[in-house]
């Protein structure tokens, strides 16, 4: 399937050739999980050594805030776990895991958010964020913004400050970034919802 509906946003920070190569590795699966939906799968990017290198280089090059303005990178389960720790390591930062509810044995704090058909929760360990920590949140996709907003609320409830958001993909027309207030954000590519 053609990728002509994918717009290169901050991915351009790594150059046109690398940007085009990475986009060529994003797989579009029509009709999944239901008819009328186009599922965007970036797992082929991770399976390709060159694609993974470009992705990590692009995430670093397109940080929405200066490197020295945050202390840790937080990633959302599950796909934020695939590149969040690698980005944190590249930057010399720690990594904070934001998990789905019920996955952490120690004491946690939770935040509930709305889905199309109900609610979901995300959690972090109570000791994961120290008061005053400045945190960059990373995830694979910004759509309606519910999960990213819940992650921000969790970090702030733990005493930290969210300085910005870094996303691989964004879905146009869902206004998910609006839920994040005035926090700086970057998105490597965007496509219609």
Image: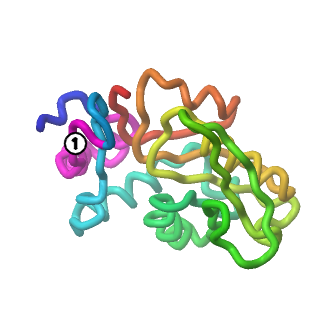
Q: Residues within 10 Å of mark 1 (few under 14, many from 20)?
A: some
Residue at far bottom of view? 105
Q: Residue farthest to the left?
A: 1
Residue toward you, 164 or 147? 147
User: Is any part of residue 66 visible from this angle?
Assistant: yes
Residue 72 rendering spot, x and y as whole percentages: 67, 64
Q: Residue at x 81, y 50 (%)?
A: 156
- As drawn, is 65 to the left or to the right of 181? left
User: Picture coordinates of residue 175 (x, y %)?
Assistant: 53, 24
Q: Is residue 36 above or below residue 19?
A: above
Q: Is residue 73 visible?
A: no
The residue wearing badge 1 is 28
* Position of 179 relative to 11 (above/below): above
Q: Quadrant of the C terminus?
A: top left
From the image, which quarter does the N terminus lie in? Answer: top left
In the image as oriented, which residue stretches furthest toward the top? 173
Residue 110 percent location from the top left of the image: 76, 56
Q: Is residue 109 above or below residue 15?
A: below
The residue shown at (67%, 67%) is 102
Number of numbered tags placed on the structure image: 1
84 on left or right of 121? left
Describe residue 190's horizontal placement relative to residue 135 as left or right.
left
Residue segment shown in magenta: 8-32
165 part of magenta stretch: no
Identify which residue, 172 or 189, lies in the foreground: 172
Identify the residue at horizontal 50%, vertical 59% (top origin). 80
User: Considering the numbered disc 1 on the image, is that residue within a helix, a strand or a loop?
Assistant: strand
Q: Position of residue 149 (x, y in %)?
A: 67, 41
Residue for point 45% across, 40% down: 187
In this rendering, position of residue 102 left or right of residue 155: left
How is the model colour-coded? rainbow
Residue 146: name its quadrant: top right
């Amino acid at each position: 399937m053609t990728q002509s509906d994918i717009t290169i946003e901050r991915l351009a920070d790594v150059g046109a050739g690398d940007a085009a190569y990475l986009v060529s590795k994003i797989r579009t699966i029509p009709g999944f999980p239901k008819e009328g939906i186009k599922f965007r799968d970036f797992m082929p990017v991770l399976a390709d050594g060159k694609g993974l290198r470009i992705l990590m280089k692009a995430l670093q090059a397109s940080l929405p805030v200066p490197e020295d303005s945050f202390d840790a990178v937080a990633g959302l389960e599950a796909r934020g776990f695939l590149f969040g720790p690698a980005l944190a390591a590249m930057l010399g930062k720690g990594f904070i895991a934001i998990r789905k509810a019920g996955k952490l044995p120690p004491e946690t704090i939770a935040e509930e958010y709305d889905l199309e058909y109900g609610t979901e929760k995300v959690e972090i360990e109570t000791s994961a964020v120290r008061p005053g920590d400045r945190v960059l949140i990373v995830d694979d996709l910004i759509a309606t913004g519910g999960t990213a907003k819940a992650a921000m609320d969790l970090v702030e409830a733990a005493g930290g400050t969210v300085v910005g958001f870094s996303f691989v993909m964004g879905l146009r027309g869902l206004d998910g970034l609006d839920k994040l207030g005035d926090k700086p954000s970057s998105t490597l590519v965007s496509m219609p919802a």
